[in-house]
Image (cartoon, helix red, strand yellow):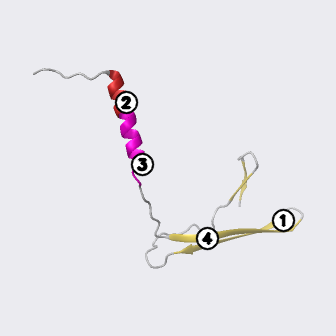
Amino acid sequence: MKNITFPKKFIKNAIILLTLLFSLIPFYGYSTHIVGGELNYKCLGGNVYEIRLRVYRDCYTGQVAYDDPAAVGIFGSNNVLITTI
């Protein structure tokens, strides 16, 4: 049997083409447990804030347990975690 060899440039171009083609195929992800939510805060004066988190869930198909209490991270302007509440 004769071995078939392909030039490296052909293989590189084929890999690039396949990668581009696969990136155009849509992949869908669906969530069935959380359908929405709200995160609000209110300054009560000084350095005291009231934070309210409301999560709307799908009671029909959602069987996932939620964290109670939920952890909320406070980040600075440079994306560094300041504290969690």
CA gap between label 2 and label 3 equals 17 Å
Secondary-structure class at tag 1:
strand
Q: Quadrant of the N terminus?
A: top left
Which mark is first along the chain, 2 or 4?
Answer: 2
Q: Residue at x 53, y 71 (%)?
A: 35
Identify the residue position indicated by label 2 in the image: 13
Left or right of 57? Residue 73 is: right
Position of 84 relative to 80 (above/below): below
> Magenta segment range?
15-26
CA gap between label 4 and label 3 equals 30 Å
Which mark is first along the chain, 2 or 1?
Answer: 2
Q: Are marks 2 and 3 in contact (CB under 8 Å)?
A: no
CA gap between label 1 and label 4 equals 23 Å
Mark carried by residue 48? 1
Amino acid beneath label 4: Gly
| Residue 74 spot, x, y in % from top left | 72, 56
Q: Residues within 10 Å of mark 1 (few under 14, many from 20)?
A: few
| Residue 64 spot, x, y in % from top left | 48, 69
Left or right of 65? Residue 45 is: right
Identify the residue position indicated by label 3 in the image: 24
Q: Residue at x 37, y 30 (%)?
A: 13
Identify the residue position indicated by label 4 in the image: 37
CA gap between label 4 and label 2 equals 45 Å
Position of 27 relative to 37 (above/below): above
Q: Residue at x 76, y 48 (%)?
A: 77
Secondary-structure class at tag 4:
strand
Residue 13 vs residue 68, the one in the foreground: 13
